[in-house]
Amino acid sequence: MSLSITPEMRPEAAPAHVNPMLWHQSTGYARQACARIFRDGGSPADALKAFGLAAEAHIDWSKAVELIAETLSATPARKAA
C-alpha cells in the first residue's frame, strides 16, 4: 500500500522564488504575530494593517498568515542612485 500525496495535502510549501528556510522563518513569525493580534481581539484585517498591507474585507487567518509571510520573505527592491 502506498500513499499518494496530493498538492492539497502537502504542508505549506515555500513559493518557488523564496528560500525554503526563509519561508519557514517568515511563516513562523507571521503566525506568532497573528496569534498576538487574535489574542488581543483583533481581526485578520487588523493583522494585515499592522504589516502595512491592504486589508481585504473577507479574509481568514490562514490567508492573512500567508500574505504576511510573503511580505516578510520578499526581497527588498533596490533603490536607484
Image: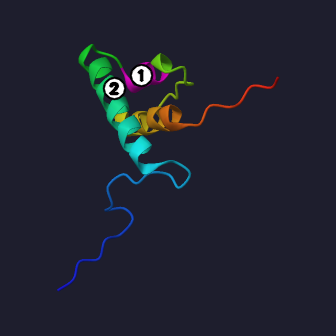
Seen at 35% across and 30% down, the residue is 29
Instruction: Give the numbered dot on residue 29.
Output: none
Residue at the image point whose x is 40% and y is 26% from the top: 44
Disc 1 residue type? Ala
Relative side of 39 to 30, left or right: left
Magenta residues? Answer: 43-48
Q: Which residue in the structure is indicated by mark 1?
A: 47
In the visual, does 46 lie left or right of 36?
Answer: right
- Colour mode of the rendering: rainbow
The secondary structure making up most of the magenta span is: helix
* Residue 46 screen position, x and y as percent: 43, 18
Where residue 3 sits, quadrant-wise, is: bottom left
Q: Nearer the viewer, residue 76 or 14?
A: 76
Q: Indicate whether 37 appears above or below 74.
A: above
Outermost right residue:
81
The correct choice, above or below, for 41 with respect to 2 in the image is: above
The 10 Å Cα crowd at callout 1, few under 14, some 14 to 19, many 20 or more, is: many
Gap between marks 1 and 2 measured at Cα: 6 Å
Identify the mark nearer the N-term, 1 or 2: 2
Image position, residue 22 (x, y; %): 43, 41
**Circle 2: element type:** helix
Give the quarter of the figure containing the N terminus. bottom left
Mark 2 neighbour class, 10 Å CA radius: few under 14, some 14 to 19, many 20 or more: many
Dividing the picture into quadrants, the one containing residue 47 is top left
Marks 2 and 1: in contact by CB < 8 Å? yes
Residue 72: give x, y in percent of width and height: 49, 32
Q: Which mark is residue 34?
A: 2
Residue drawn where x is 28% and y is 19% of the image:
36
Q: Quadrant of the C terminus?
A: top right
